[in-house]
Amino acid sequence: MRKIPVLSAALALVIAGTAACGSSSSPASGKSGSTGGTAGAAFDPKSCQGGTLEVLNQASISKLDPARLYTSGGGNIPSLLFRTLTTRNRLPGQEGAKPAPDLATDLGTPSDGAKTWTYHLKDGLQYEDGTPITAQDVKYGIERSFAPELSGGAPYLRDWLVDASSYQGPYKQPDGINAIETPDTKTIIFHLSKPEGDFPLLATATQFAPVPKAKDTGVDYEKHPISSGPYMVASYEKKKTLDLVRNPHWSATTDPLRYACPDKINITAGLESAVINQRIATGTGQDANAVTTDATVGPDQLAQLNSNPELAKRVSKGEFPATTYLAFNTKVKPFDDIRVRQAISYAVNRTTAVNAAGGTAVAGASTTFLPPQKALGYQAYDYFPAGATGNAAKAKELLAQAGYSSGLSIDLYHEADDADNLGPKLATSIQEALKAAGITVNLKPTDDTGYRDLTGKPSTEPGLSLQYWGADWPSGGPFLIPVFDGRQIVESGGNFNLAQLNDPAVNAEIDAINQITDPEQAQARWGALDAKLGQQALTVPLFYEKDVYLFGKNVKNAVPDGWRGQYDLARVSVK
């Protein structure tokens, strides 16, 4: 799950040095799919061929095996190499939050109440060496993702597939997973232990990428994975660089959603955010052809864009579906009393919380756990209206009812630094807001690794902590299930249900929604469930994430979508 990164000042210097020659101009609005200048113009993929795209990123390229990558749904680096049964729709805005067929002819045919899903592969699918892609290759690719030595991919199939929880991969158990059938080279059938209406969304994960068994070299496969996408590996230096060239056997006829415009794509990793944005803003040499998928622009820099209209045209804005919130452990006093939880909900100052994250350009105040995106099922509600700055009077009233008329002292656990916006800045803003309501907040900073261990184990979880949750795909399911399904509580660690809620009615509603295969019907039910959960004050939503990216002066079609709020490397082009 991504975080809003810490902001740097280096880009502001670059912008300030060039701003004098331009008049005032405001960048586009912050909704998914909005962007400045040429990025929003009509685009013809047939005219985009050629050139070299440079990708400048912070995160190191430490994995290049589809079994170990979490998802290609974002449509970025993995999706240049690996096609999957389905992919995201790759369109601007909320249309891009929908799944679309990729290797498969459609989104799958459900049967047995969404417990069985059948897919048929398109004709003419080939790997980079010209050999055909088969249903057996897709099955084998999935089975590899269960191997302990190839850990790191999406964990859902271990739970979803019938009798697959103990499977250890094809190297130890070559007979494979019986719950995946391949009656012929074009057909693959999945048998699930429970209904899963979101299966077409999960099928975008890279573990659904085909792997030819004859070419599998185990842990060394990532040195040169066999491409099924529009590009293949030319060279790869782990954690540093990845150079891609065209896959001569990829066909746009079978893959109309990936434009695959540049002839080459060079990815450089491990760079500082300030360096990345400075290089893209300046645009010298090949940096004019540069983009980034993880170095967002901060509010200080955005303020400077208003006086630099040329640079403002090279801004792309999207929203990753994520919420930063206060998490209550309802098993710990005084948070076992809903009146105390309600009091804190009234007392928070979302204006200072948003400012601590960097301001309204990168965060939006939220009173709902689901972020404001249709694909998730968002329904507006505000049961504990705190206004812009908090409602101290209402908070004091509830505390008095709970027996704390003289005030209350509580501990707030948070990360030791502000790298993930769960650190001292945000914690201090909460401390100051609650002070006005007579609540003394004792700050408890914890290093990042220790923080996850501490809060993710029910026996050690504190009563109140700062948390962040982002969706694995744009649906209410992956947003609400891990956080509120009582059957997802993990006593040994790695638990996300921090309220430790185990409500049979909530669990039953989750099961009922999972049987729905119509996205709009499911969205309405997820939204209603979020609203119902919100009444219990199990969390205090603070803000949702906004992302702002710069792109090079020669880059076209850098249009973000509603899946992850990023532009798609498979669609951008260079002059």
Image (spheres, rainbow, N blue to C red):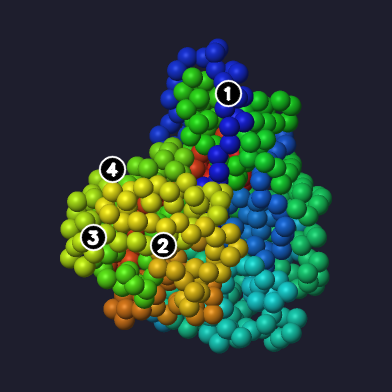
Percent of width and height locating residue 14: 62, 24
Classify 96 as above or below 509.
above
Residue closer to the observer: 18 or 210: 18
Q: Is residue 98 left or right of residue 207?
A: left
Residue type for callout 3: Ser
Residue type for callout 2: Asp
| Label 1 element class | helix
Q: Which comes sooner in the sequence, label 2 or label 1?
A: 1
User: Who's the residue at 69% across and 80% down the image?
Assistant: 169
The part of the image, by quadrant, that contains residue 105 is bottom right
Q: Which comes sooner in the sequence, label 4 or label 3?
A: 4
Disc nearest the viewer among 2 and 1: 2
Residue 519 can be seen, yes or no: no
Q: Which residue is mark 2?
A: 411
Residue closer to the observer: 167 or 570: 167
Percent of width and height locating residue 543: 39, 49
Task: Give the spatial CA distance, label 4 vs label 3.
Answer: 25 Å
Residue closer to the observer: 538 or 401: 401
Residue type for callout 1: Ile
Q: Which mark is residue 406?
A: 3
Disc 3 crowd rating (10 Å Cα; few below 14, some 14-19, many 20+) is: few
User: Who's the residue at 21% across and 68% down the image?
Assistant: 403
| Label 4 element class | loop
Disc nearest the viewer among 2 and 3: 3
User: Who's the residue at 63% across and 36% down the image?
Assistant: 274
Q: Which mark is residue 388?
A: 4
Q: Is residue 250 left or right of residue 113?
A: right
Q: Which residue is mark 1?
A: 15
